[in-house]
Image (cartoon, rainbow, N blue to C red):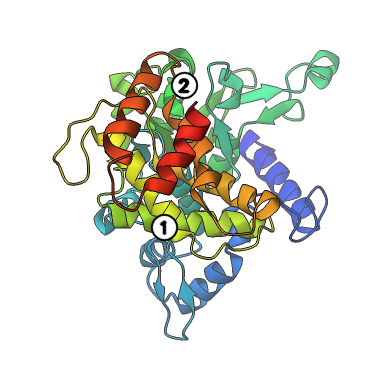
Amino acid sequence: MTVSESVRTASTTTASTTSAGAGRPAEGSALRPHAEHAFADELTALAAADDYPRPARWRLSPWGVATYLLGGVLPDGTVITPKYVGPRRLVEVAVSTLATDRALLLLGVPGTAKTWVSEHLAAAVSGDSTLLVQGTAGTPEEAVRYGWDYARLLAHGPSRDALVPSPVMRAMADGMTARVEELTRIPADVQDALITILSEKTLPVPELGQEVQAVRGFNLIATANDRDRGVNELSSALRRRFNTVVLPLPATPEAEVDIVSRRVEQIGRSLDLPPTPDGMAEIRRVVTVFRELREGVTTDGRTKLKSPSGTLSTAEAISVVTGGLALASHFGDGVLRPGDVAAGVLGAVVRDPASDRVVWQEYLEAVIRERDGWKDFYRACREVSA
């Protein structure tokens, strides 16, 4: 048995065990279900309605994958909810890339839904978004290539049974989509372990004198940003192996409000939080504050602003509103009010206690205080800022 066959056997065994229920939480108990479970009904309906050509081992056609991400209505009336709100062409380029032999790099500032898009692409293409390498400063080369079961290694020496395949190796053997999150946080020498995999579509195992060759259907999605601290630049050799798609921040306030409200609703349901009536007003306020401070100018373009050190991303806005929803549900009257989101806004804006607090105080007094209809929001922010 070759290494590839051994890895495929191990992957099949793992999949069978998972589908049988071992090791998986009871239905509905997962705090954050994987995309292929959370949207299983939509994926099933799309697969039934999708009569376009499908690349090898894809669960859906490229058209079906794009529809899953962007939303639509199927001929039988099934509504496919949008998973990504943004330019359609970017999604089409990303999906088309995965249908070729080039890997996909989703690049953007923090909070532009890179991880979210990566997960849903893998779920729609392969039906499994869990072949994941999470990039950190301590990610070892074994996480990208393979490791060893040291008890077996010491007892019997290098062997197929002692080899522990990485998610990337398993994806290669099974023709699946692997994911590498936060690629630029991985040390440069570990990043470069991907070069042979992406260029030659093979993973040598010199200890056994063998290799794992990628079968059709294999590809890799990586996410990265070059703004946060602790970022390791990609080598030019590695960057050439990717087709890069830059995910932008939401283009308009309306688009960002739509994204935040959709995600807050989804997260609220998973946490069994009751829906709050009239919450859109506070969502719009949070989005407005974040966009103005992020862009350094008020919405009407009349007042220039200093920007704080944080990113004030859409993801942070979702977190602030979700926290406010929990406050309103557990300690309020169930209605989302300025006092429920004010502390979260302050925490997101003031990351550096010295410089960011000055930026926040100037914005609070010069902009929020003078804005019509924002007096209650101003008072709530002043209270938590004192």
Query: Vertical placement of 40 versus 267: above or below?
Result: below
Residue type beneath disc 2:
Arg
The answer, for residue 347, to whether it is visible in the render is no
> Which disc number belongs to residue 39?
none
Q: Of 177 and 348, which appears nearest the observer?
A: 348
In this view of the protein, can residue 206 be seen by the observer? yes
Circle 2 Cα neighbour tier, 10 Å, few/some/many (<14 / 14–19 / ≥20): many
Amino acid type assigned to the residue bearing label 1 in the image: Ala
Give percent across and percent down for residue 221: 43, 40
Choose top left, top right, bottom left or bottom right for residue 56: bottom left
Residue at x-position 76% and y-position 55%: 29
Point out residue 81 in the picture as x, y percentages from the top left corner: 46, 67
Q: Which residue is mark 1?
A: 281
Residue drawn where x is 38% and y is 21% of the image: 356
Could you say where residue 246 lies in the image, as x and y percent from the top left?
A: 29, 40
Q: Residue furthest left?
A: 302
Q: Nearer the viewer, residue 278 or 122?
A: 278
Q: Which mark is residue 185?
A: 2
Q: Residue at x 81, y 47 (%)?
A: 23
| Front one among 150 and 353 | 353
- Looking at the image, residue 22 sits to the left or right of residue 305; the answer is right
When asked about the image quadrant of residue 142, the answer is top right
Q: Quadrant of the N terminus?
A: top right
Closer mark to the observer between disc 1 and disc 2: 1
Query: How crowded is the residue under tag 1: few (<14 C-alpha within 10 Å), some, or many (20+)?
Result: few
In the rendered image of this protein, does residue 339 appear above or below residue 348? Answer: below
* Residue 205 at x, y percent in the picture: 59, 23
